[in-house]
Structure formats: structure tokens, C-alpha cells
Amino acid sequence: MQPLRVGLIGLGTVGSGVARVLTEHPERMTHRAGRVIDLVRVAVRDISKPREISLSADLLTDDPMAVAGDPNVDVVVELIGGQSPAKEVVVTALESGKDVVTANKALLCAEGAELFARARDLGRCIAFEAAIAGGIPVVHVLGQSLAGNQVTAIEAILNGTSNFILSEMLGRGESYGDAVRKAQALGYAEADPAMDVDGTDAAQKLCLLTQLAFGTRVTPEAFPLQGIDTLDLTDLQYADELGYAVKLLATAKLVDGQLEMHTQPTLIRHARPLAQVDGPYNMVALTGDAVGPTWLSGQGAGQMPTASAVLSDLIDVAIGRAHSTFSRLDLWDERPPIPVQPAEDIYRRYYLRFPVEDRPHVIADITAILGNHAISLASVIQHEAPELDDTTDTGTPIVPLVIMTHRTREGQIRDATAELNQLESIRQPWVCMPVSD
Ligand code: NAP
Ligand code: HSE
């Protein structure tokens, strides 16, 4: 068979990992693909930059469109990230008769509908295993292994950077800033790490999973979204004391014919598999109507785990499997969309922490407001104030009051919040986090 000629666009963290395997293990790739997979062109932004991988200088260009349109390239691997010029690269590659492999969840979440339809109309395919949960083969699992199921629930840890930061802060006592810098140095973070820590990256991946599992296109604006960037170590410690881990949890599940969706820091009981995922690892917990609960776990970020997913897509393109998978994935909006449940109807438990004045009637005032909104309390903790510490101008100590609620609607919590914010005894900011049982 003819070699599969690869044009690689982007030679950063992930691109270097892909190039390394293609150049250091060609026999492995040839064996698995049944033909030679040949790296013929590579586009970067700055040709003069020192690289961790040495490639022949005549492979390199700083013109990504030249690679996307090159008639001597069969498949384009887009690993530059972001929207532009990534979108133009993908469109040009498809229009030049090439298949595309990409890890770019930001692009697919924003422009997937147009790009997938364009690929289908042109008889090409887009393979994107690396765009969701790094090295975990969740696209293959949804498209092939669980294809006989209707997925009913997805609960997932989808951002390696956030999970790594949480583990570093609680497990090693690292500061938030140091943990972010470490995640960047290890190649887990996006070019703009704000996308990781504000929850955007996990929400984009959840939207792609929702499309694959439920055939419904959703954008991150449609559901509650919060990142780890506003978390306080105190809450990780309280959660731990209560028997929970805090994880950036992305959820999409069928509830009464609607999709309950959210991506937020969430308390998860220690005994659950999701609570035990540490460092840059991700987990996708899927429930299918036939298979039942299923857990997929592995490294969700980093050079070689992500390269692993790109390489499997390249092999799929080489043997023709990528086309059949692509044509059967639920990407075409053919099923009637499932409505997203309004946020105020979401029904779950909550963790609340109020910094309060340690004086008479404070707990009574707070619990009265919660009770008036039919919010039932599961537990209440108030530790004694440390002596000579954390006092107000008037000498009244401020202490944390931690409350776990029973299940309640988000709308009740919002209504109670408006009244709680009127209480002078509560210091801002107070904290409200959902609990997943
Ligand atoms: P990265 O380290 O920042 O690398 C980006 C590469 O693209 C660099 O080689 C850069 O060139 C090149 N580039 C950027 N703009 C370009 C342009 N206009 N023309 C030509 N080349 C350009 O990024 P990464 O971490 O490898 O991520 C790549 C993609 O994979 C992103 O979509 C990301 O979301 C996704 N992803 C990353 C991970 C991860 O763990 N890092 C995991 C899953 C998915 P220079 O080298 O010359 O600057
Ligand atoms: N920045 C992403 C993360 C890379 O930390 O999960 C993997 O998509």
C-alpha cells in the first residue's frame, strides 16, 4: 500500500510527542496501520525556535496553510490549538481532499457543527480522540464499544490541569500559584491556562461528550459553569473532614426527559472512584442502559498520553476505520435535541460555608432562612474560634459555619442566597458547592 503522508501542524507539547513516535517507532506504526505512516511536512510558528525533537530542516515551514493544502499530504494533524488559524487549516485540509486529526476541543466545541458537516459533505472525516480526556479512548468507546447502549449519565473529571492543582494543594500543601506554574511546566495547561482553571476547557469537552452520547449539541453558556480558580483551601480541608474530595466535575445526565448539565467544583464521597482520581488523571464515569456503570480512567493531559490518542486516530485513518467511525458518531443533529434542564430545577445536595460572627442567634438566623426555603440540613459544623485570631474590629471572632444540606432545588438555594446576603453576621464571600452522592 502507499504510505500515508502526514502533515503535522504544531510541534509543541503534543505535536512533539506525535513526531517522536512517528520518527522513533516507524516499524510499530507500519505494523499497526498496515502501511508506512510518513511525516512529510511540519508547520510551526517560529522555525528558529530550539526544539526537543530534531527533524530535518526541510520538513519545517512557518506556513500552516501551505501544509493544509499540500497535494503531497494525505492527512493533516492540527495541533496548534485555538480558533484561528486552526479553523482555516481544517477547512483547507478538508477542501483539499484530506482527512483531519485534531486535539482541539475549543475549535470543535465552537465550530464542530459546521466542520463536521463540511467533512461529511466532502466525503472526508475528522478524528478527535485526543480532544476529550487526553489519553482515555472515550470517543472510541462511545462510538464503538458502547454503541448498543443509550447512555443515561456522564460524570467526568475532564481537566487534568485543575485536577493536578487540587491534588498539589491538598496533598502537598502547594500554593495555588505554584501549582498552576507546575502544571504549565509539565505541559498539562492550555496556552492560556485561564481556560483550564475557569472550567471552560472541561465544559467544552463535556459538550463534545454530550453530542456523542445524547446526539444533542450544547454550548457551555447553556449550563452552570464554574472553575477551581475561586476555590479556597479551607473548603478542600472541610470537605476532607466530612469524607469528601472536591473535584471539578462535569455532568450530563438524563432526568425526566431533560439533560441535567453542569461543570463545577463538586464534593464527591471518598469511597467513589471519581474521588480517587489524582494528579493529571481524568475519569469518565458513563452509565449505559445495557452496560450499567462504567469507569474509564487515565492521564487526561500531557505530552505522551495525548500523543497516544492522536496516533490511534492516525492509524484509524490509515486503515480506513476513521471514516466508518466518523460516519456513525452522533454528530449530525439528526435526533430531536434533548432540552437542557433549567438550572433552577437541578436537584442535589449542597455544601455551604459561611464566615460568621461568633455571637448569639447567628446560627438560628441562617437556619431559619434555609428552613423558610424548605432547605433541609443534613449536618452543621462550627469549630471553636482559635484564640487571639481572626477577630473583627469589635472583637467578635469570625468562625466558619459549615452546613451540608439534603437534596434541594438550585432555585431554592438562589432564593435563600438573596436573603442570606442581607444578614450582617455573615462575612462575604461565603461558599456554596454542589455535592454528588
Ligand atoms: P503548544 O505546546 O502551545 O503547541 C502549539 C504549537 O502550535 C507550537 O508548535 C506552535 O509553534 C504552533 N503554532 C501555534 N500557532 C501557529 C501558527 N499560527 N502557525 C503555525 N504553527 C503554530 O500546544 P499543545 O499543548 O501541544 O496543544 C496543542 C493542541 O492539543 C491544543 O488544541 C490543545 O488544546 C490540545 N491538547 C493539549 C493537551 C496537553 O496536554 N497539552 C492535551 C489534549 C489536547 P511554535 O512551537 O513555533 O511556537
Ligand atoms: N489543558 C488540558 C487539561 C489538556 O489540563 O486537561 C488536555 O485537554
Image (spheres, grey):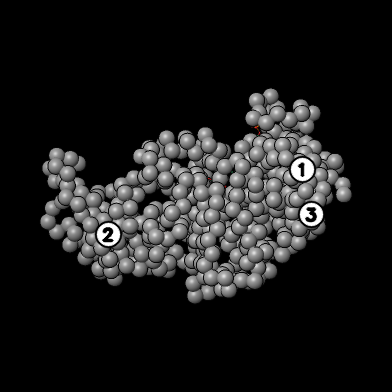
Alpha carbon separation for disc pair 2 and 1: 59 Å
330 is higher (above) or lower (below) than 421:
below
Q: Amino acid at mark 3?
A: Ile
Look at the numbered discs 3 and 2 and tell me whether their residues touch, using CB distance below 8 Å. no
Q: Earlier in the sequence, mark 3 or mark 1?
A: 1
Report the Cα–Cα distance between label 3 and label 1. 15 Å
Identify residue type, mark 1.
Glu
Residue ID at (65%, 49%) = 309
Q: Nearer the viewer, residue 18 or 70?
A: 18
Question: Closer to the camera, 38 or 71?
Answer: 38
User: Is 27 drawn above or below residue 337 in the view shown?
Assistant: above
Q: Which residue is mark 1?
A: 27
Looking at the image, tell me whether mark 2 or mark 1 is earlier in sequence order.
Answer: 1
The mark lying in front, picked from 3 and 2, is: 3
Q: Tell whether 180 sits left or right of 304.
A: left
Name the residue located 38 percent from the left edge and 44 percent from the top edge. 171
Can you give x and y, in whole percent of width and height, for residue 399 in the image? Answer: 20, 49
411 relative to 36 in the view: left or right = left
Q: Position of residue 125 (x, y in %)?
A: 75, 55
Residue at which label 2 appears:
403
> How far across and down, in percent of the image, does residue 231 sit?
37, 47
Query: 10 Å neighbourhood of mark 1: few (<14), some, or many (≥20)?
Result: some
Residue 228, labelled with which disc?
Answer: none
Query: Image height check: is 421 above or below 304?
Result: below
Q: Check disc 3 and report its element: helix, strand or loop.
A: helix
Q: Which element carries disc 1, helix, strand or loop?
A: helix
Which residue ends up furthest to the right in the rendered image?
A: 1
Q: Please give the name of the residue rendered at 40% of the width and 39% of the height, measured from the top-left corner.
A: 176
